[in-house]
Image (cartoon, helix red, strand yellow):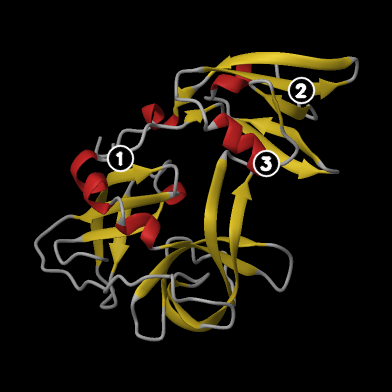
Amino acid sequence: MFDARGYAVTVSYLLLDAVAIEARGRDGRAVPARVVGIDFDTGLGVVKLEGAGPWPAAALGSSQGLAPGARTGTVGVDEDNDLVAVAGSVQAIQPFAAYWEYMLDRAVFVAPASPAWGGSALVNDRGEVVGIASLRLGEAPHVNLAIPVEKFTGVRDELLAAGRVVSRPPRPWLGLYTVEAHGAVVVSDFSPVGPAAGAGFRKGDRIVGVNGVSVGTQREFYEQLWARRAGDTIEVAVQRAGGVVVIAVRSMDRQRLFRAGE
């Protein structure tokens, strides 16, 4: 919770397919909540608790002072859905690219990790929220990815007012799932509701270019894809048995598939 009026920030993947949303406090009360905003670029979302406040709210800080070895705490729930506050530390701060057309220029990696901490608050030694925990990554010993809180504070007012970020153009989305393997970007799957699903891609295709520019990493792929606007036709060159094929896909604004507050 970042606002005494009942607004809380969490990770967006928890909200996208939710049939109902509840927030549970330290006193055990379960309070219904609704989605008021989603930012697909950062992977964050905002919910509003129903009912009268004021609600307890945490202070938002900054992750800029964090460095490997810095002490942190994760405040959330464990695998048994019990409220916990667990001490930990920063393991690394570096860019992060994921398979679902998602990338952070700066992400915080902390340990210990838990698969249940998605949406939990990452706090510094002053108790300020400096990040929002997201995925558990890697093999044991795992780390948790945390999204720096500045990714939220810079767009907070827009999310509350409009349900999305309106100050930047929506990114073009294809719905391609990719992995980096053997020095290439390889198609592993596609979203059933994305433009790529019926465009002619095959699992195992190696993406070698976007709009005439060669790419060899997910980062390069995303940078070239996002250099255009949602709705633009994207030409993706893929290598498969028999040679290189160029597939033209009309991209879309992913936000059109989700309406906050509805």
Amino acid type indicated by mark 1: Arg
Residue that extends furthest to the front in the rendered view of this protein: 213
Characterize the local packing of mark 1: few (<14), some (14-19) or many (20 or more) Cα atoms within 10 angstroms.
many
Q: Quadrant of the N terminus?
A: bottom left
Characterize the local packing of mark 3: few (<14), some (14-19) or many (20 or more) Cα atoms within 10 angstroms.
many
Amino acid type indicated by mark 2: Val
**Labels 1 & 2 near each other (Cβ < 8 A):** no
Circle nearer the N terminus (1, 2): 1
Q: Residue at x 62, y 47 (%)?
A: 98
Characterize the local packing of mark 2: few (<14), some (14-19) or many (20 or more) Cα atoms within 10 angstroms.
many
Q: Secondary structure at mark 3?
A: helix
The image's mark for residue 218 is 3
Q: Secondary structure at mark 2?
A: strand
Q: Secondary structure at mark 1?
A: loop
Circle nearer the N terminus (3, 2): 3
**How many labels sit on residues?**
3
- Against 32, residue 207 (above or below) is above
- Across and down, in percent, residue 129 comes to 36, 72
The image's mark for residue 214 is none
Residue wearing tag 2: 238
Residue wearing tag 1: 164
- Locate residue 137 relative to residue 54 in the image: left or right: right
- Between the C-alphas of marks 3 and 1, the distance is 25 Å
Amino acid type indicated by mark 3: Gln
- Against 24, residue 90 (above or below) is below
